[in-house]
Image (cartoon, helix red, strand yellow):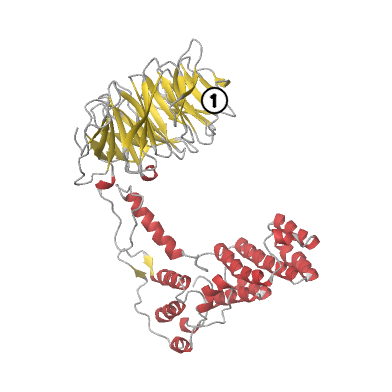
Amino acid sequence: MGGVEDDEPPSKRMKLSSGELAGLSNGSSLSESVGGSLRDLMARPLPSQGDEEMVGSKGVIKRVEFVRIIAKALYSLGYTKTGAYLEEESGIPLYSSLVNLFTQQILDGNWDESVATLHKIGLLDENIVKSASFLILEQKFFELLDGEKVMDALKTLRTEISPLCINNSRVHELSSCIVSPSKCILDGIPSQNAVRAKSRPKLLENLQKLLPPTVMIPERRLEHLVEQALDLQRDACMFHNSLDGEMSLYTDHQCGREQIPSQTSQILQHHQDEVWFLQFSHNGKYLASSSKDRSAIIWEVDANGRVSLRHRLSGHQKPVSYVSWSPDDHQILTCGVEETVRRWDVSSGECLHIYEKTGLGLVSCGWFPDGKWVFCGVTDKSICMWDLDGKELECWKGQRTLRISDLEVTTDGKWIISIFRDTALLLLDRESKSERSIEETEPITSFSLSRDNKFLLVNLLNQEIHLWNIEGDIKLVSKYEGLKRTRFLIRSCFGGLEQAFIASGSEDSQVYVWHRGSGELIEALPGHSGAVNCVSWNPSNPHMLASGSDDRTIRIWGLNVVNLKQKDTHSNGIHYCNGGT
């Protein structure tokens, strides 16, 4: 099984029963075998319960591999007798007798014999044989040093390790241990016998990772296969959006549509004109909105998901088109249309600073990841950076942005992203000044950056949303269709658990939600009475979505909970409802 074949029948081969995995976990010897009754049972060959080479309805699972992996899992779980019984009853040993012998020699510290056995296993890749021999002889070297047999250790290094002609840098490190034994402590080999004894099972684990899986099955292989199957089921689940949804092995995983926020839980009515932009804070505890009414509002989200007004931010002389939260959510930027950018304290609602360019207007704003600098798009199509006190630090001239444009910066502060032509996005490396671009065939109206900085969501004039992968080679990943847009600036966002969904506003007064991976439209949410300009998904609550509209309201969407009690409908400018206006 995985090594060279023996002449002995399966029932006569050495079994890695109690010692095989117990040795890996606590350093015990393989000589600790199972009880006498089981040993007597194992002496009698049992017929195999089926001779089919494949198992399962698909005919793709090899019986031998399946049984060996189950046996490995049983030993890993501590079911030693059961594992040994499975080997005996199936006639399929976990390992060949040579591998069993090799394992025992490693645990017993018989280094020369283990190297000799390694060469007999029948490995075809000479590099693997050399690498495994290196690990074994390195362990021998350290244990000789630990026993103060310096000359023997030196001989091992010169006559056994060095001739392998691999890992020369490691050989030099081992040489330094001869000169300075204290160096060995840095290499993780303290000179206490109890600690050293545990290093042999660790060596066996390292060898297990190095040798082909047909020779030594990787640790926890069955668990890995099961986890992989669960991951695939979750990824294929169109509506998976639950933080606490435990997946069961008893049934195939499938979430229902009720996991998607699709019911209006609140209507926020404090703005006096069209709501143009809104964004949840990074911690999900606040929501900021901006409006044509020349104000911005900071809303607070309580522990129950209820949203209430905290501060109205007044001072702009023109409509407020954009807001941006600081990395720590303690401050917020607001941008008036071709006007100024203001920095506010979230706790007090106080305006801390006004950023402006003489004779020019600002069209967008954002923060650098350390929260010490802010950057803005300017009407002369440049991008400027200030410190918090308003000192201009840097300005990228030329056509870096449009007069109405979004700006994003990656969380490492390396890339600044903007729309620099009607149909193109610019990715500017702030340090090297190098540039990359994304070319579309239709005019770009807005874009947003994913939380992991790997994807850009781009809204186009032709009523499509494109998803671009910007990690490595830039490539188009997916397209989302269905929304309506003819005249206005419509924004979309990533959202849900692990940002597995795409949401967007639309001119037909609906909020659209797609499954990010498949591109399938899964919800079109009615409720607004005007164009929906912007959406934002709460980053800490996958069941909370907000939308802002020309109807002057903000809708908070939650799960479609049956029998939700109707709340007070006119308190503090907030209307609570159950899916209706």
**Residue reaching furthest to the top:** 359
- 397 vs 242, left or right, is right
From this view, report whether residue 141 is shown above or below residue 323: below
For image coordinates 55% across by 82% down, the residue present is: 32
Secondary structure under the numbered disc 1 in the rendered image: loop
Percent x, y of residue 14? 52, 81
The reply to whether residue 204 is visible in this rendering is yes
Q: Residues within 10 Å of mark 1 (few under 14, many from 20)?
A: some
- 136 vs 6, left or right, is right
- 116 vs 263, left or right, is right
Which residue was labeled with disc 1? 388
- In the picture, residue 58 is in which quadrant? bottom left
From this view, report whether residue 10 is shown above or below residue 478: below
Percent x, y of residue 401? 46, 21
| Nearer to me, 479 or 252 | 252
The reply to whether residue 124 is visible in this rendering is no
Percent x, y of residue 229? 37, 58
Which amino acid type is marked by label 1? Leu
